[in-house]
Structures are given as structure tokens and as C-alpha cells.
Amino acid sequence: MDYLWTEDTGAGFHYWQLVNEYLFGNTLRVESKGSNQGILDAVRELKPLEKDRYFIAFDIVYDNMDIMNKYLELRELAERYEEQIWMLDMTCFEYVILSFCNLIEWTGTNKKDKIAMRERILRAFSAHRIDIDCIYDAATLHYLMGFKRYSTEKVLKSITMELTENDEWSVKGEQMGRCWYKDCCVRSDERRVKCHMTEGKSGADKIMELLRDQETQRITECMRK
């Protein structure tokens, strides 16, 4: 049996359920362990059966020492069962959304300042962290310095939430907003002020575009072997 364990709850957990459904035909058992500590505790106690594989979706955030201490212990534990426990190379669920190539086009957000910051942050992003030395824009630097206990993960979550604030595209509730995976509504509906879809798409087409995008494909590469 193949398992996917994640710390994510809510929309992040829903994302992994959609990964399972659309990319792996529901062949995975997807479980949320609720937190970083929950993941670590579960792996500490794990004694996998011979044919079991465990894919661990744990956020890698190099500028958060608490997370990194847990991650380093997880890697050490995984090495005991190197053919059965796989650490996924991911930063966080919010980075998957923020880096999605169609994010701005689809959501129709008009926050031009945050759109510009997104581009600068993505250009400065490397090896699971924002390289602040690569950012020269004063407004973006001011935004980054405004975080109490700054970390890359906090920044990614904050700006992603601002760019997906419409309920239909939200990624902060119990599930991802319906526009990510449900068929498009009628284009003539004047209430759809935060959508730039030029033509209707099926829910399956939309979620597959997200899951075929670079970041999800990179993260799940080891799962397809």
C-alpha cells in the first residue's frame, strides 16, 4: 500500500486528496497528521510492512529552525527505511498555489502591488527560501520586513491568501475554493467580478492544469517511479 502523510489540514489536505484522485487514481491512502509534530511522531512510531511505501509531505523551510530541526530528524528516521519512506521535496502548499502559472489570470485579482511583489518573490525564490539579497524594490522589502518572526513560509502564506481572497478561489478554508475543481459557471453572470476566464472550463481541466504545473510535478516525481 502507498501512503501519503501530510501535516496539512483544510485546503492543503484537500489539495493532496485531489492529487491522489487526479494523478494517482485514488491508489494512495492520504492522511493528515495535523501538524509538524504530528508527522514526526507518526514517523517515529512507523514500522512499515515490506511492500508499503510512505510519502511524507513535510514543509521544508530553512529559515524556521523549529521546522528544520524536525525535518532533520525526519530525514534521519527515513534513512532507516530508504526504499519505503520518501521525503517529498516541497516548501509548502501555498508555494504550489503562488507559483501556479495561471494564478493571476484565473483569479482576476486586481491587487497590482501584490501581483508585482509575487513576481519579485518568485524570482528571488531558490532552495526553499526567499533570497532577500536578490530583491531591490523598496515596497517589497518593506512588506517582507513587516513580519514578526519572519520566515519564508509566513511570507508565502500571506501573499497567497491576499491573491486568492475571493471565496471561490480561496485556499484557506476547509477545502480549496470551488473554482479550482468545479465546472465554470456562466460567463454572463455579472457577479463574477474576480474571474478572468475567457471561456468556461470543466473542473477536471482546471485542477489538472494546476496538478500538471511545474511545482506539483516536481514534488510528486518520486511518487511516479
Image (spheres, helix red, strand yellow):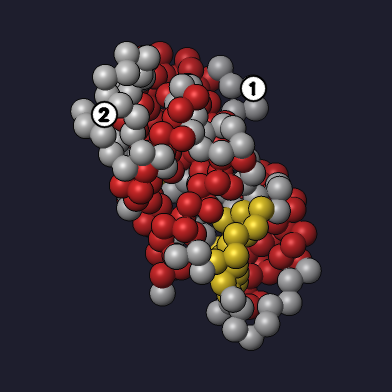
Q: Residue 68, image x and y in percent?
A: 64, 49
Q: Is residue 70 visible?
A: no
Is the Cβ of the residue at disc 2 closer than 8 Å to that at disc 1? no
Residue linked to disc 1: 148
Nearer to us of marks 2 and 1 is 2
Of the 4 image quadrants, the one containing the C terminus is: bottom left
The residue positioned 74% from the left and 51% from the top of the image is 37
Secondary structure under the numbered disc 2 in the rendered image: loop
Residue 130, quarter of the rendered image:
top left
Marks 2/1: CA–CA distance: 37 Å
Of the 4 image quadrants, the one containing the N terminus is: bottom right
The residue positioned 78% from the left and 69% from the top of the image is 45
Question: Between 134 and 41, which is closer to the camera in this rendering?
Answer: 41
Identify the disc placed on residue 197: 2
The residue positioned 40% from the left and 64% from the top of the image is 221
Q: Is residue 37 above or below residue 132?
A: below
Secondary structure under the numbered disc 1 in the rendered image: loop
- Local packing at callout 1 (Cα closer than 10 Å; few below 14, some 14-19, many 20+) is few
Q: Residue 114, image x and y in percent?
A: 39, 19
Q: Is residue 195 above or below residue 78?
A: above
Residue type at the position of mark 2: Met
Residue 148, quarter of the rendered image:
top right
Q: Residue 122, image x and y in percent?
A: 36, 35
- Local packing at callout 2 (Cα closer than 10 Å; few below 14, some 14-19, many 20+) is some
Q: Earlier in the sequence, mark 2 or mark 1?
A: 1
Q: Residue 65, image x and y in percent?
A: 66, 43
Residue type at the position of mark 1: Lys
Q: Is residue 22 above or below residue 13?
A: below
Q: Is residue 121 visible?
A: yes
